[in-house]
Image (cartoon, helix red, strand yellow):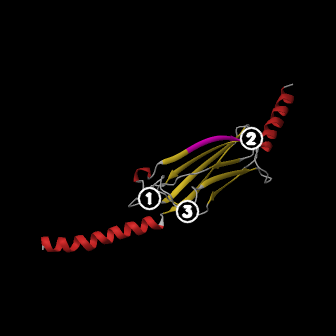
Amino acid sequence: MKKIFMILSMIVLLANIVAAQDYKIAMSTVPEQITARDNPFAKYYDLGALPSVTIKVTDSSGNPAKDVMIKASITHVNNLILPTGFPWVQGKQLLSVQNFEEDGILTIDALLFPLRGQYTVDVEVSDASGKQQKQSFTIAAKEPFKQSTKNALIFVSILVLCVPVFIYVFI
């Protein structure tokens, strides 16, 4: 009787191992090139709507994963020497979302990336059997051209105006 129980236990264990499948996790953004927006109330006519992030989970056969829990978090990478925009978000987690998806697709609409630089998107997928899979992605956000140009003009203006005054007063 013990042998039959052990054999059945092994079969059930092996069936669970075989049934557990690897997921393929993919991430995309719209638009593909993200531009940081330091003012959420300003209109950026040249940039269009706020970007969105879509996470798609497929099973080992390429079909959309059914009934999975998707957790996603977006964190700014702390690697800027001179941050612009919202410097207090540098290196901080900006978003954390956990959602049950029947079709394996999680879309996060209208995201504000307030600081240029790299953002890490950490994704964790789990199913009803308890299988978990994690993957990380990177999003690069560039600084708006207008903001870069304005900052450069301010810097050059300060140099042009202040350096002669400094030389005249102190030398």
Residue located at (24% from left, 72% from top): 161
> Does 60 sit above or below residue 166?
above
> Does 96 sit above or below residue 4?
below
Q: Identify the main secondary structure in magenta.
A: strand
- What amino acid does circle 3 point to? Leu
The label number, if any, that marks residue 67 in the structure image: 2
Task: Give the mark toward the camera: 3 or 2.
Answer: 3
Residue located at (51% from left, 60% from top): 44
Q: Residue furthest top?
A: 1
Disc 3 + disc 1, Cβ < 8 Å:
no
Quarter of the image containing the N terminus?
A: top right
Residue located at (85% from left, 29% from top): 3
49 relative to 66 in the view: left or right = left
Residue 78, image x, y percentages: 45, 55
Disc 3 + disc 2, Cβ < 8 Å:
no
- Say which element carries label 2: loop
Residue 76, image x, y percentages: 49, 53
Q: Mark 1 = which residue? A: 79
Alpha carbon separation for disc pair 3 and 1: 25 Å
The residue nearer to you, when weighing 14 against 73, is 73
Q: From which residue to which does the magenta span run?
A: 96-101
- What amino acid does circle 1 point to? Asn
- Say which element carries label 3: loop
Q: If you read the primary sequence from the N terminus, does the residue marked by circle 3 or circle 2 appear first?
A: 3
Q: If you read the primary sequence from the N terminus, does the residue marked by circle 3 or circle 1 appear first?
A: 3
Quarter of the image containing the C terminus?
A: bottom left
Q: If you read the primary sequence from the N terminus, does the residue marked by circle 2 or circle 1 appear first?
A: 2
Residue located at (52% from left, 55% from top): 119
- Determine if the magenta segment contains residue 102: no
Residue 45, image x, y percentages: 53, 62
The residue nearer to you, when weighing 43 against 149, is 43
Q: Mark 3 = which residue? A: 47
